[in-house]
Amino acid sequence: MSFFYNFGNYILFLKGMFSKPEKLSVYIDRTITEMNNIGVGSLSIVIIIAIFQGAVTTLQIAYQLISPLIAKPVIGSIVSDSSMLELAPTITCLVLAGKVGSHIASEIGTMRVSEQIDALEVMGINSSGFLALPKIVAGLIMIPMLVILSIFLSNLGGIIAGEASGILTYEEYLQGARESFIPFNLFFSLIKAFTYAFIITSLSAFQGYTTNGGALEVGASSTKAVVYSAVSILLADYLLAQLLL
């Protein structure tokens, strides 16, 4: 019953964001700020993860497929498809769930326990829309961009690892990647990115918004935001693959 109670509150929270919107200029300013926090603030960790996940995947695929009967471009084909379909969107967003999700939950949770949200409501401001909606919109804009960057850097990492280890040249890698490229795979990756972006930002904002207590409860809400976002991402990953592939 607790699940249905919390899920119902989550739906009402989302509905409440649009019940009394503020001026568009207010949302634009806050959205740009959140785009900087979510996108630019996560750039370094995304770059590091993407390059190494592409490099490691290339080495492991090569280890499993070393055979005179298998052409080397097949390695580039597998790594590039894996990067688009799973590695870049899912791994990147799981990391962002920890970084972005915990930040959103702790920020809004601190405002709740320090009664800043109550002050916004006393002034007649729709607190859920004012605090959460710009974060959700910023996430829907920036996280798919980070996923696209991750796809590119994963392939770059694969090329570097292939050249450095002597497993395959960059021409062989690109040949395999081009031969196996299917536009729908990229489209599917973006669908996953938008879905995960909404999950991370909305669930984290909800956990922060419904915080009750003091500093300990803020930490608990931050932890719940990360855990719930990660589990929801994995569940959505399975459902999207089942429905669209």
Image: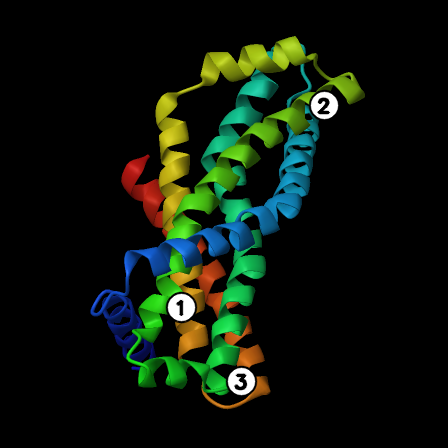
The type of residue carrying mark 2 is: Ile
Picture quarter containing residue 106?
bottom right
Dot 2 and dot 1 residues touching (CB under 8 Å): no
Residue at image location 56% in from the left, 28% down from the top: 152
**Separation (CA) of disc 1 from disc 3:** 19 Å
Instruction: Between residue 44 and residue 70, name the one nearer to us.
Output: 44
Q: Is mark 2 on a helix, strand or loop?
A: helix
Instruction: Between residue 201 and residue 163, name the one nearer to us.
Output: 201
Q: Name the residue under label 3.
A: 217
Coordinates of residue 127 in the picture (x, y in percent):
34, 74
Picture quarter containing residue 182?
top left
Numbered circle sitting on residue 160? 2
The N terminus - image quarter:
bottom left
**Separation (CA) of disc 2 from disc 1:** 42 Å
The C terminus - image quarter:
top left
Coordinates of residue 136 in the picture (x, y in percent):
39, 57
96 lies above or below 206: above
Q: Quick check: 22 left or right of 209?
A: left
Residue at image location 50% in from the left, 90% down from the top: 213
Coordinates of residue 208 in the picture (x, y in percent):
45, 74
Residue at image location 31% in from the left, 71% down from the top: 10
Other-residue count near label 2 (Cα within 10 Å), few / some / many at <14 / 14–19 / ≥20:
many
